[in-house]
Image (cartoon, grey):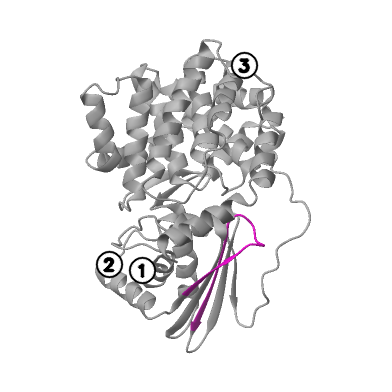
């Protein structure tokens, strides 16, 4: 039986503000740390990434930059990054720093490599100067810098054998519901700050791209106004804005801004549409965050499936059921409705098109919750589904970790070919 402190710590650990997509930002944080620890004038920067992180940094917008690319992310960390700012490392990119980063890339000073035999989040930079050589290693989480070494250093060797199970897996759905229902509301009031942060980005995104187009269709009556469309509008607007590189922070969840947007703004949209009390909304958001953490413990930090659907969208759906007065069975029903629908939606890198997946995930999250409240859910024997929480996500984890082991490589090959790499 886990106590209140454990659940609060899991939520706090999962949430963090980020300016820009978290994969290029993780690269910039790593290389900014290398620059801060190296003496002398830069000669060369070598960056090694896992294929999942490389995929997500290839084509997404970068805060403060008018061009894209993995090498530019790395170079901006060197010329503009604040290594103390965590995921807001690129909050203050000046025109001069951007031009210097472009010069580094143009002169071939930034080499980018990928590596297959590493965890699903791996960043290694080696920064060589005329006086020094520094290596920085990031593992498993975007801000988890585990080593800063001066040459000579030994090559990184991945750990062998099974990894320790994450504590959240030992929790039951009822324990998480009980926590969300009984925790003093002032201890989860900080969740409103994340909601407000993401609402500000959604407002900025209403004026262009998918946010503008979707808003127009709702105003024209092509798409009916409902809790589903309200969630889609908020989430799509925010996601498109941040994927474009807008220099505004969002509250991430389990290392992803789009997951933070899907999780928090789906719940906010339904709370507004159904006049849900503030306290109930915050308790729903706390529960949704715990479900998101639980799911990601099985799928991994990065994977070949879109976590906006199967993790944060699914968590948001559980939160919506909570706001509607549903219990454990309705929550399991909502989860089955989602996993039985979009468990195979792939992650093909971070870019503006992710906003369409966020729109789909948020809308389905709301629909799945309302269907579950009507007693309608996909049967427990359908496909990869199961009747209990643990088995349901053991199946999903097996699908992602084993069944889709080669999917990411194929996605990266296709993306590199399309980009002319």
- Where 176 falls versus 328 (above or below)? below
Provide the major secondary structure of the magenta segment.
Answer: strand
**Mark 1 falls on what kind of element?**
helix
Using a 10 Å C-alpha cutoff, classify the residue at mark 3 as few (fewer than 14 neighbours), some (14 to 19) or many (20 or more): some
> SS of the residue at dot 3?
helix
Query: What residue is pinned by disc 2?
Result: 94
Q: Specify whether residue 118 is painted magenta.
A: yes
**Residue found at x 57% / y 52%:** 408
Tell me: residue 293, above or below residue 222. below
The x and y percentages for residue 387 are 69, 22
Which class describes the residues within 10 Å of circle 2: few (<14), some (14-19), or many (20+)?
some
Q: Which label number is shown at residue 80?
A: 1
Disc 1 and disc 3: Cα gap in Å?
A: 50 Å
Query: Which label's residue is closer to the chain start, 1 or 3?
Result: 1
Q: Residue at x 51, y 60 (%)?
A: 54
Q: Residue at x 37, y 61 (%)?
A: 90
- Magenta range is 111-128
Q: Residue 100: horizontal and vertical position, in percent?
A: 32, 75
Q: Which residue is mark 3?
A: 329
Q: Earlier in the sequence, mark 2 or mark 3?
A: 2
- Mark 2 touching mark 1, by CB under 8 A? yes
């Amino acid at each position: 039986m886990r106590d209140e402190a454990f659940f609060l710590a899991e939520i706090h650990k999962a949430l963090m503000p980020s300016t820009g997509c978290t994969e290029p930002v993780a690269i910039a944080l790593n290389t900014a740390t290398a620059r801060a620890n190296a003496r002398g004038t830069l000669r060369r920067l070598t960056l090694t990434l896992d294929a999942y992180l490389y995929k997500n940094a290839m084509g997404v917008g970068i805060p403060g930059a008018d061009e894209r690319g993995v090498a530019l992310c790395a170079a901006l960390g060197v010329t503009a990054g604040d290594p103390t700012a965590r995921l807001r490392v690129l909050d203050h990119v000046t025109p001069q720093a951007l031009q210097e980063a472009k010069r580094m890339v143009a002169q071939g000073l930034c080499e980018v490599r990928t590596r297959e035999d590493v965890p699903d989040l791996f960043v290694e930079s080696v920064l060589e100067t005329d006086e020094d050589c520094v290596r920085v290693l990031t593992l498993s989480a975007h801000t988890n810098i585990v080593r800063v070494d001066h040459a000579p250093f030994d090559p990184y060797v991945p750990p062998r054998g099974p990894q320790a199970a994450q504590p959240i897996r030992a929790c039951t759905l009822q324990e998480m519901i009980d926590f969300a229902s009984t925790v003093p509301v002032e201890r989860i009031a900080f969740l409103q700050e994340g909601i407000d942060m993401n609402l500000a980005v959604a407002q900025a995104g209403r004026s262009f791209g998918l946010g503008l187009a979707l808003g127009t269709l709702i105003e024209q009556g092509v798409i009916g106004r409902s809790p589903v469309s309200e969630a889609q509008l908020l989430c799509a607007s925010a996601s498109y804005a941040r994927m474009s590189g807008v220099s505004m922070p969002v509250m991430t969840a389990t290392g992803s801004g789009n997951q933070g947007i899907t999780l928090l703004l789906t719940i906010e949209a339904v709370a507004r549409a159904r006049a849900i009390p503030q306290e109930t909304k915050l308790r729903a958001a706390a529960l949704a965050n715990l479900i998101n953490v639980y799911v990601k413990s099985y799928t991994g930090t990065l994977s070949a499936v879109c976590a906006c659907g199967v993790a944060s969208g699914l968590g948001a759906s559980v939160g919506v059921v909570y706001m509607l007065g549903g219990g454990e069975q309705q929550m399991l029903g909502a989860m089955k409705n989602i996993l039985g629908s979009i468990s195979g939606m792939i992650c093909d890198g971070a870019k503006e098109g992710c906003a369409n997946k966020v729109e789909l995930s948020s809308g389905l999250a709301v629909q799945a919750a309302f269907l579950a409240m009507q007693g309608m859910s996909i049967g427990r024997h359908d496909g990869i589904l199961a009747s209990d929480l643990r088995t349901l996500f053991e199946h999903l984890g097996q699908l992602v970790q084993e069944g889709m082991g080669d999917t990411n490589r194929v996605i990266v090959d296709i993306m590199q070919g399309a980009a002319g790499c």
